[in-house]
Amino acid sequence: MIETDLAIVGAGLAGMTAARTAFDAGTQPLILEAGDRIGGRIEGLADADGRVVADLGPSWVWPAFQPGIQRWLDRLNLAVFDQYEQGDAVLDGFAPTPMRHQLPGQFGMARIVGGPSGLVDAMAAPLDAHCIRRGSPVESISQRHDGRLEIERQSGPAVIADQVLVAAPPRRVAERIALPATIDPGLPGALAGQSTWMAAQAKAIIRYAHPFWRDAGLSGRIASRLGPLFEAHDHTSADGDAALFGFVATPLSERRAGSLEQPIIDQLVRCLGPQAAHPEAVVVRDWALDDTICSEADRREPPAHPSVGPATLRAPHLGGRLWFCGAETADQSTGLLEGALLAGEAAARAAFEQRPQVA
Ligand SMILES: Cc1cc2nc3c(=O)[nH]c(=O)nc-3n(C[C@H](O)[C@H](O)[C@H](O)COP(=O)(O)OP(=O)(O)OC[C@H]3O[C@@H](n4cnc5c(N)ncnc54)[C@H](O)[C@@H]3O)c2cc1C
């Protein structure tokens, strides 16, 4: 049996923000992570030297409109750079051949130098490495007679915690974590109702020696009706590692390992010219196959951006012992990095204020 003041379930951005907030307030939390790494949907593609050159998960932030992002970037001393939008986009499948077209970019859309994985790493930096238990999928949370919560994992001793913050995607919680029968009866439905943003999406990174599209006055942006990418963007890093990224349109039922790479290259040749034929690498990250994040409901249902869920997702449960704080529980920027930051921070602060007094 392991005893702790505060256990956090899930080491994505929300869980790590909660952990950092609790740590800064003087609590050393115990973080239980199902997977073998921290970051959750945030994952960097590293080169042979371990340097992150592209983002396999999220890339974009909007600091001008996202106060949580701006505040944490400042605090952790992280810089941003503009998403490259100069030049024409290419429309693919809107005419017999691809055509150049001006498409407005999104005002204020930026990327973090080093990628969002740099944000998670900076968040985790001061925490004791032993407080993060990887390979620890939580299966149930129950309440003991003394009020404390007991966490059962797939393997390993039970964890007894004064308080628990659950930062796993709500739908996955609904499907995989048994909660006490005394919980708010509205909670299970509220958890199951929050689709996990981008959880069933596959994202492709296509690395090149040089951002050749820029030389031709192209932004690297493609909007396509033909696929396999329905949209693509310049993804060259702040250090100049040339790349494009794209979101895969091919339905999950037709996605086979190794089947997308050549069709993606063919599409890029069609849209950007023959220089696209020889990428240094094509990496497809299929998030739908990630069982630690994507729920059965996310795989089954058409992708939908989650809207703000019911208040029970942000309320204290079991007398201030249990809280939920994934990005999909947030009441602002729900499902986004900003939502994960705000939810993790708010839950850790509220739990700290309501921590049980030990006699
Ligand atoms: C391809 C893609 C592109 C995206 N693009 C953007 C973007 O450009 N901008 C943006 O703002 N957002 C974007 N998003 C969304 C963004 O990634 C999420 O909002 C954010 O990362 C969610 O953080 P989180 O901590 O709430 O959840 P997650 O990152 O999903 O982390 C949850 C963690 O909980 C763990 N876990 C699950 N079940 C258990 C269990 N039973 N026990 C223990 N641990 C468990 C998981 O392993 C995971 O580590 C994108 C997402 C994807 C997949």
Image (cartoon, rainbow, N blue to C red):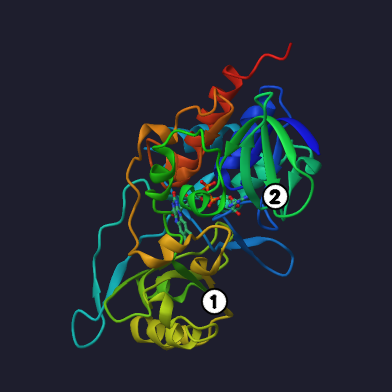
Res. 63 visible in picture: no
Residue occupying the point 66% across, 22% down: 25
**Which residue is tagged 2?**
153
Residue positioned 57% across, 24% down in the render: 351
Quarter occupied by residue 190: top left
Q: Is residue 69 among the parts visible in the rendering?
A: yes
Which residue is the extreme one toward the top? 359
Among the 4 quarters of the image, the one containing residue 179: top right
Residue type at the position of mark 1: Tyr
Quadrant of the rendering where the C terminus is positioned: top right
Q: Which quadrant of the view contains residue 321? A: top right
Q: Position of residue 138 (x, y in %)?
A: 65, 49
Ligand 1 closer than 8 Å to the CB at disc 2? Answer: yes
Q: Is residue 338 above or below residue 260?
A: above
- Check the image and report above or below for 11 versus 285: above
Q: In the depicted view, which residue is nearer to us: 127 or 181? A: 181
- Give the class, few, some or many, for how many residues have Cα within 10 Å of label 1's Cα (few <14, many ≥20): many
User: In the image shown, does 124 or 15 lie closer to the viewer?
Assistant: 15
Residue on which disc 1 sits = 208
Q: Nearer the viewer, mark 2 or mark 1?
A: 2
Residue 181 at x, y percent in the picture: 52, 38
Circle on res. 300: none
Amino acid type indicated by mark 2? Arg
